[in-house]
Amino acid sequence: MNGFMTSKVLPMRLAWRQRLWLLRNLFDHPLGQVIYRRLQIYSSFHRSPVYFAKKRDQIIHLIDLAIDSGCSVSGSRVVEIGTGWVPLMPFILWLMGAREIHSVDLYRHLLPVSANRIIRWLVNDRDSIEMIRQRADEKHFGNRLAKALQQTEPASLFDNPPMHYHAPADACSLELADRSVDLVLSNVTLEHIPAPTIAELFEEMIRILKPSGRTVHLVDPSDHSSHHDPNISPVHFLRYDDATWEHLSGTGIAYHNRLRVPDYKKLIQASSFRIERFDSTTNPKSLEDLKSFRPAEPRWREYSDDDLAKQYLTFVAAADDRIQS
């Protein structure tokens, strides 16, 4: 996937320029991965349960979308694109009764010390367990929850059947058979992948999905520095042309493709997928900020302010029977 990696950990509050400088230099520095892992461990012990609950809610929403589309989790073979360092999705799918889970990441971000804390939070949090129980296959739920609670190091379950952790691995070239997967999911991952690679990824999903399969994604097209710096809006990075932005952010940990919501629709439509659901919200702060500047790249000026200000896109797409048969 062209050497791009995702960023899901930065424990301190930094102004956006400082944050980008730090993340860019972490990727370029010979000891960058060592420093990044130490930040990950620090962050896993200092992030509040509110953060983990937000991630849980996003995952539950994706699973609900899959269920609503007719794709049952119980007994399914599922692929997650972009494990990151918060392995909630594979464990939630496992507790719900998935037959097999493959979680794929370009880099091996996951560390047992941080994963253990996150999984312990999940299996001991009453709200989380009730949410999962309501959607789970009762045949598996009780036994799997008991097994997780008994583990002194629950992260040890993560890379053992039926869960499989593939990292480093290229999600565009998976060692999975044609038409063998029921569901492909990702949570705030696609925005960290260049558009041409997303197109390749969609074709790989088409290859591995059964004709009845679904792919479900949550995408955050916003400037991620706005989550850390309240002085900028989610469309702040549209002020910079491509060359300037690459200089600021690099192509590593801080990489963001800056695709807008209509761009994702075009990528899906250009693939062999059939869109079943495509939803997004408009950020008022972004709309207000767009009044104060002209987007730097001409391609963005073709879109309305409402399109540019969209965030938290969710979509469901089907592997079209007519194309695969």
Image (cartoon, grey):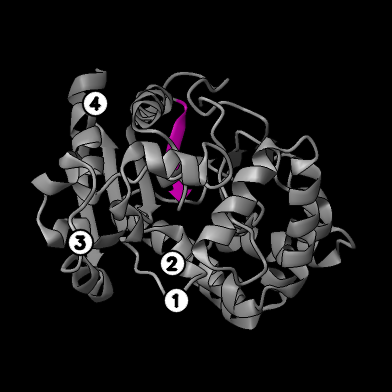
Q: 97 or 270: which is nearer to us?
A: 270
Q: Are marks 1 and 4 in contact (CB under 8 Å)?
A: no
Q: Residues within 10 Å of mark 4 (few under 14, many from 20)?
A: many
Q: Residue at x 40, y 46 (%)?
A: 191
Query: x, y (%) of residue 143?
Result: 72, 61
From the viewer's perspective, is residue 38 above or below residue 134?
above
Q: Is residue 185 magenta?
A: yes
Q: Which residue is mark 1?
A: 230
As measured in the structure, the alpha-carbon distance from the residue carrying label 2 to the one carrying label 4 is 34 Å
Q: Which residue is mark 3?
A: 293
Q: Which residue is label 4 attached to?
A: 272
* Residue drawn at point x = 66 percent, y = 44 percent: 25
Circles 2 and 1, Cβ within 8 Å, touching? The answer is yes
User: How far is disc 3 from disc 2 in space, using C-alphas?
Assistant: 17 Å
**Which amino acid type corresponds to the residue marked 3 in the rendered image?**
Phe
Task: Indicate which label's residue lies in the foreground, 3 or 2.
Answer: 3
Q: Amino acid at mark 1?
A: Pro
- Earlier residue among tags 3 and 2: 2
Q: Is residue 14 visible?
A: yes
**Range shown magenta:** 180-187
Asked which secondary structure carries label 1, the reply is: loop
Q: Is residue 282 shown above or below 252? A: below
